[in-house]
Amino acid sequence: MSTPHIVLGIETSCDETSVALLRDGTVLVNAIYTQAEHERYGGVVPEIASRAHIAKIDRLCLSVLSQSAIGVEDLSLIAVTDSPGLAGALLVGIGFALGIHCGFGVPIIGVNHLEGHIASVKIENEALAFPFLALVVSGGHTALYHVDDFAHYRCLGQTIDDAAGEAFDKVGKLLGLGYPAGQAIEAEAGAYDGDEIVSFPVARVSSPGFAFSFSGLKTAVKYHIERTGRAYAFKHRRMLCRSFQNAVIESLVHTTIAAARYTGLERIAVVGGVARNRALRAALAAAHGGAVFFPSPSFCTDNAAMIAKAGFEHYRKGIIRFPKMTPSPALRTATAPCVKSTPVS
Ligand code: KG4
Ligand code: ZN
């Protein structure tokens, strides 16, 4: 099987419409359109997300191809996110990718969104050797994986309720910071220069595996605001943001370091939208004796370059899965069989 030369990546699992091109594993362009349509609702509205993807995807793809002076006939592979995510939103990307596949005979591969996040760290860190521990920390997921290779993962534990990014977004809403709120909370927390801190509870979930829990923390912030009153809380918003962020970071760092010690994995990768957080980056790097790797910010939040990268690496290994039309929430693990097939053209 020849190595795919130029890969078109397509990502529409939530509220980012993204199209990317990879040439020989190097990102040529990674175009991301973040749907502002959801801001007024304080969260993603699935039907609005699907419609916004439909309105954007073809023009975004055309502009990515023309920017790079690449024609559809030059493509060697299309990699499209097919799970997990919002069903309608995923189907827009899958349908668009299948159109190119059927119309132009370009091979196609379905990519799990979480595999994409894990692959994102290899885009700029090709030297990061397997095996490594991956903390996937985003708006929809918070989980630890033992990564043996591309397509070979073992889940060591995950959140039993909210994802860390979801907690940032919910607390941001309570504090009037808009949606999504991760970046705004980081900015507020960074601007706080006082000593007073609220000790919000940090959940320690000992089973199953290396698990996380963030819904209690969000509720604690909510009760704190109710107790002190909104006006007082808003006046002390920077301090509350710092206190909340500290609690999230403490939980992520504690469990990740425990998993690294238990598995003996020396290299840690942190991926997903929350991996943009500089305080988290600094805390993990300080707590871990070995190397910690992070993607650049534009490869942390949802993007098609990471999907193209995962598709490219899977294709090279002969692990070719036709896109599924039935979104599932899970990431295939080493114990589950990987489907091997040849692309339908
Ligand atoms: O990976 P992503 O784009 O989407 C999912 O796959 O869920 O992650 C989005 C999440 C949002 O919850 C957002 O608030 C959070 O990442 N986020 C951050 C930061 N930037 C984005 N959280 C904390 N600090 C940040 N700087
Ligand atoms: Zn994501």
Image (spheres, grey):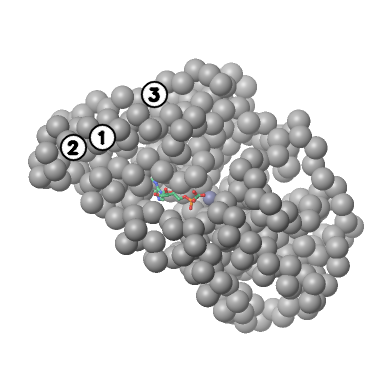
Q: Residue at position x 73%, y 65% from top?
A: 78
Residue at the image position 49 percent from the left and 69 percent from the top: 52
Q: Are marks 1 and 2 in contact (CB under 8 Å)?
A: yes
The vertical placement of 255 against 291, above or below, is: above
Q: Which element is circle 3 on?
A: loop
Left or right: 121 in relation to 238: right
Residue 31 tag number: none
Q: Quadrant of residue 145?
A: top right
The secondary element bearing badge 1 is classed as: helix
User: Which residue bears the numbered disc 1?
Assistant: 221
From this viewpoint, is residue 22 visible? Answer: no
Counting residues from the N terminus, which is met first, the one under dot 2 or under dot 3?
3
Residue underneath mark 2: 225
- Confirm or deny contact between disc 3 and disc 1 (CB under 8 A): no
Give neighbour class at mark 1: few <14, some 14-19, many 20+ (Cα, 10 Å).
Answer: many
The residue indicated by pointer 3 is 203
Residue 265 visible (yes or no)? yes
Residue 296 spot, x, y in % from top left = 50, 53
For numbered disc 2, what is the local secondary structure?
helix
Residue drawn at point x = 61 percent, y = 79 percent: 62
Amino acid type of the residue that numbered disc 2 sits on in the rendered structure: Ile
Q: CA distance from mark 3 to mark 1?
A: 14 Å
